[in-house]
């Protein structure tokens, strides 16, 4: 089975995240997607508690969308992938990232371990030239670049700042009931 690994802060999870997952599933890039909310880490200062982000993601769980609440204690992507290799020995793992993350991928810890897996890059408005430059640098055989996904100008930041437009109603209610993001 082709298993997509989609790490992210999901702070909060929104329709944009799920549209990416459904696009990859519907277009047979992967058979299932494991969404992995990350712990608090160096470049994310405003993350709410991991338990809340997992609880909100659980509203999206299906037989093809797995919300991972087990592998969240690793600070580095390569560690997560190494552990998932052991836990899913029969599956081929695909790392799912946005093109914004691609631009710094060469600086990720133990990049060679990460590059043992195919990396699906969702273009989020990054110029083709910037993408090509990094893919060429790291080896194009490691990448599947998705340019035909309809770009959506949605961010968790917009939602934290008060927009409810791209939230599942159950997630919105969870946010309100738990007084998250100042609501």
Image (cartoon, rainbow, N blue to C red):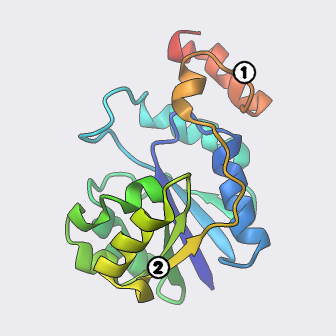
**What residue is disc 1 on?**
173
Q: Please indicate, yes or no, whether residue 61 appears anywhere in the rendered image.
A: no
Query: What residue lies at 42% left-to-right and 73% top-to-bottom?
Result: 132
Between circles 2 and 1, the one closer to the viewer is 2
Q: Can you say whether 39 is above or below 68 in the image?
A: above
Please report whichever mark, 2 or 1, sits nearer to the chain's N-terminal start: 2
For residue 49, what is the image quadrant? top left
In this view, the residue in front, 100 or 46, is: 100
Q: Can you say whether 58 is above or below 11 in the image?
A: below
| Number of residue marks | 2
Quadrant of the image for the N terminus? bottom right
CB within 8 Å, label 2 to label 1: no
Residue 84 in the image, given as x and y percentages of width and height:
42, 73
Residue 153 in the image, given as x and y percentages of width and height:
63, 39
Mark 1 nearby-residue class (10 Å; few <14, some 14–19, many ≥20): few
| Disc on res. 138 | none
Query: What residue lies at 57% left-to-right and 35% top-to-bottom?
Result: 155
User: For the residue labelled by badge 1, is the local secondary structure a helix, a strand or a loop?
Assistant: helix
Q: Is residue 168 left or right of residue 130?
A: right
Q: Can you say whether 118 is above or below 47 in the image?
A: below
Real-space Cα distance between discs 2 and 1? 38 Å
Quadrant of the image for the C terminus? top right
Query: What residue lies at 71% left-to-right and 42% top-to-bottom?
Result: 15
For residue 4, what is the image quadrant? bottom right
Residue 40 in the image, given as x and y percentages of width and height:
32, 38
Residue 57 in the image, given as x and y percentages of width and height:
62, 43
Mark 2 nearby-residue class (10 Å; few <14, some 14–19, many ≥20): some
Query: What residue lies at 34% left-to-right and 70% top-to-bottom?
Result: 134
**What residue is disc 2 on?**
143
Q: Please indicate, yes or no, whether residue 149 appears anywhere in the rendered image.
A: yes
């Amino acid at each position: 089975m082709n298993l997509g690994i989609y790490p992210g802060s999901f702070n909060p999870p929104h329709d944009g995240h799920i549209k990416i997952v459904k696009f990859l599933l519907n277009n047979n890039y992967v058979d299932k997607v494991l969404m992995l909310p990350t712990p608090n880490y160096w470049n994310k200062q405003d993350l709410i508690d991991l338990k809340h982000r997992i609880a909100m993601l659980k509203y999206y769980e299906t037989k093809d969308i797995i919300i991972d609440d087990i592998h969240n204690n690793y600070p580095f992507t390569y560690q997560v992938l190494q552990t998932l290799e052991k836990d899913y020995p029969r599956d081929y793992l695909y790392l799912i990232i946005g093109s914004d993350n691609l631009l710094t991928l060469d600086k990720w810890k133990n990049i060679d371990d990460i590059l043992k897996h195919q990396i699906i890059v969702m273009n989020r408005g990054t110029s083709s030239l910037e993408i090509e430059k990094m893919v060429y640098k790291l080896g194009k055989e490691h990448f599947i670049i998705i340019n035909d996904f309809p770009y959506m100008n949605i961010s968790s930041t917009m939602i934290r700042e008060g927009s409810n437009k791209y939230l599942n109603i159950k997630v919105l209610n969870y946010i309100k009931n738990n007084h998250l993001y100042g609501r």
